[in-house]
Image (tube, rainbow, N blue to C red):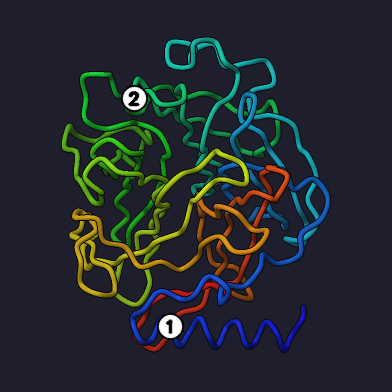
Amino acid sequence: MRALARSALVLATVAAVVTGTAAPAAAYPPPGVVTGDVGVHDPSVVKRPGGGYLVAHTGANIALKTSQDRTAFRNAGAVFPGGAPWTTTYTGGDRNLWAPDLSYRNGQYYLYYSASTFGSNRSAIFLATSTSGDSGTWTNQGLVIESRTSDNFNAIDPDLFVDGQGRWWLSFGSFWSGIKMVALNPSTGKRADSTIHSIAGRGGGAIEAPNIVARGGYYYLFVSFDRCCQGASSTYRVMVGRATSVTGPYYDRSGQAMNSGGGTEILAGQGSIHGPGHQDVFSDTDHDIIVYHYYADNGASLLGINWLGWDSAGWPYVH
């Protein structure tokens, strides 16, 4: 894995993190080696109880991929091969469904996914469940939350987080007034109440794709800043902040609130790696893992996977 060069990259990244400065773009490591069917957008990965990995990502009726070793991936069909007509109010009939969030708990897979059109906040997040995760086995459980053009938020890019007390939370959001969070009923996976928490924002600027993990007494909120979906011109980058309460307030390493535009950069484009983002962080048996998409020079959207480390102050870095 180009050990010496990679070690130098890791040391430069850690040094930058420890001093509180953003690492130079050249200090970020390249994506790890993946093979096979690796064309993805907005990936979410879960470890399967029987072994291997299941990936869900943006695509026609939500696309699926599988891997046995986190390196070689193959196409595994669609969540809804027969279509998802209940989403047409939000998609205008487009079969493309966005930004799924995949998890496994209570003996079944949970999939939160988005229905919208580009640039609109007439959007919705739905829930589907399956005992196997295989194409065609998913049952749509219905609407979780929607946004209308009169709202100041956008109901896309869902991320489920279950805290240490067993409480379920759904963070979501893209642009508009920023990243939001609602409590869910663990029995149904649907909204528990009408409260909407604001956990990050850039005053209407480009922020989306929340992902929350807990570690060492903190809740870490990973988000993507800047522009997605523009091929090699994409400027997506991965940012992070942390809080002592799941509902915030979240602060970056310098102490700036994420509700006021704060965020510490941990991954950005460099060389032929353009616009890495829409990250998903999970723990594996060997390391913590960060999964994301990025764009190649030809504009193709590809799967990126790296290890995620933690420095002595408890801040994450990609290696």
Q: Which mark is residue 155?
A: none
Mark 1: amino acid: Ala
Q: Quadrant of residue 56?
A: top right
Q: Quadrant of residue 126?
A: top left
- Is 77 left or right of 196, judged from the image as shown? right
Residue 99 left/right relative to 199: right
Q: Nearer the viewer, residue 189 or 309?
A: 309
User: Residue shown at 46%/25% (left/top)?
Assistant: 118
Q: Measuring from the top left, give residue 282's x and y in whole percent.
A: 52, 62
The residue shown at (61%, 38%) is: 131
Does residue 50 appear left or right of residue 203 in this picture? right
Depth check: give the residue in front, 264 or 48: 264
Q: Which residue is mark 1?
A: 16
Say whether disc 1 or disc 2 marks the residue closer to the N-terminus: 1
- Where, by quadrant of the figure, is residue 7 drawn? bottom right
Q: Establish if 102 lies above or below 1.
A: above
Q: On the rendered image, what quadrant is the C terminus found in?
A: bottom right
With respect to residue 317, does 166 lie above or below?
above
Q: Residue at x 34, y 77 (%)?
A: 216
Residue kind at label 2, given as amino acid type:
Asn
- Residue 293 in the image: x percent, y percent? 60, 50
Q: Of circles 1 and 2, which is in front? A: 1
**Residue at the (66%, 28%) spot, across then down:** 137
> Going by the picture, which residue comes out furthest to the right?
36
Q: CA distance from mark 1 to mark 2?
A: 37 Å
Label 2 neighbour load within 10 Å: few <14, some 14-19, many 20+: many
Tag 1's secondary structure? helix
Residue 120 position (above or below residue 233)? above
Q: Which residue is mark 2?
A: 121
Badge 1 crowding class, 10 Å Cα cut-off, few under 14, some 14 to 19, many 20 or more, is some
